Amino acid sequence: MIRATLRMRVLPGREQDFADAWEKVAMATSRTPGNLRQSLLRGGPREYVITSDWESRDAFHTFERSPEQDALTAPLRELRETAQMDISEIVLHVEKEDKIS
């Protein structure tokens, strides 16, 4: 599994537009083969982090290099000032165990 992490600074006053656009992109991306989950985080007033988990690096790159991805994410690019992406392998993932009642 891999995680793509995209750090962005959003244009002033466009934070809600960005969150709304991301939700549409995330819903469409979630139907892409190999996509596992996505999250939108906010670190500061205009600082956002998108994480996107994928079954494999190949699945991510197939999506990332597709014309569909380019068109789908265009609204996000129009709302940001800066962007930096990192790709990392998920070595270990632990989730909270369900409590038995």
Image: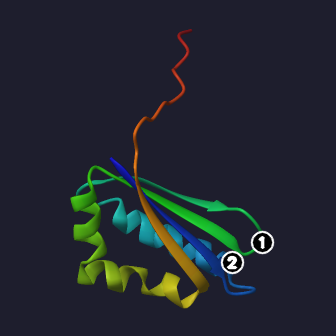
Give percent across and percent down for residue 75.
48, 86
Say how many tags the image has: 2
Give percent across and percent down for residue 52.
43, 58
Relative to the observer, which residue lies in front, 101 or 1?
A: 1
Element carrying mark 2: helix
Residue 101: quarter of image: top right
Residue 78 lies left or right of residue 71; in this view the side is: right
Residue 32 visible in rendering? no
Element carrying mark 1: loop
Q: Residue at x 69, y 71 (%)?
A: 47
Which residue is tagged 2?
Answer: 15
Rendered view: 48 above or below 14: above
Which residue is tagged 1?
Answer: 45
Relative to the observer, which residue lies in front, 6 or 31?
A: 6
Give percent across and percent down for residue 92.
43, 35
Name of the residue lying farthest toward the right: 45
Please state which amino acid type lies under the numbered disc 2.
Answer: Glu
Q: Residue at x 48, y 30 (%)?
A: 94
User: How packed is label 1: few (under 14 Cα within 10 Å), some, or many (20 or more)?
Assistant: few
Q: Residue at x 67, y 76 (%)?
A: 16
The mark nearer the N terminus, 2 or 1, is: 2
Q: CA distance from mark 2 to mark 1?
A: 8 Å
User: How packed is label 2: few (under 14 Cα within 10 Å), some, or many (20 or more)?
Assistant: some
Please state which amino acid type lies under the numbered disc 1.
Answer: Pro
Residue 66 lies left or right of residue 91; in this view the side is: left
Rendered view: 94 above or below 99: below
Rendered view: 66 above or below 62: below
Name of the residue lying farthest toward the bottom: 78
Residue 53 visible in rendering? yes
Residue 15: quarter of image: bottom right
State how the image is colored. rainbow
Disc 2 to disc 1: CB gap under 8 Å = yes
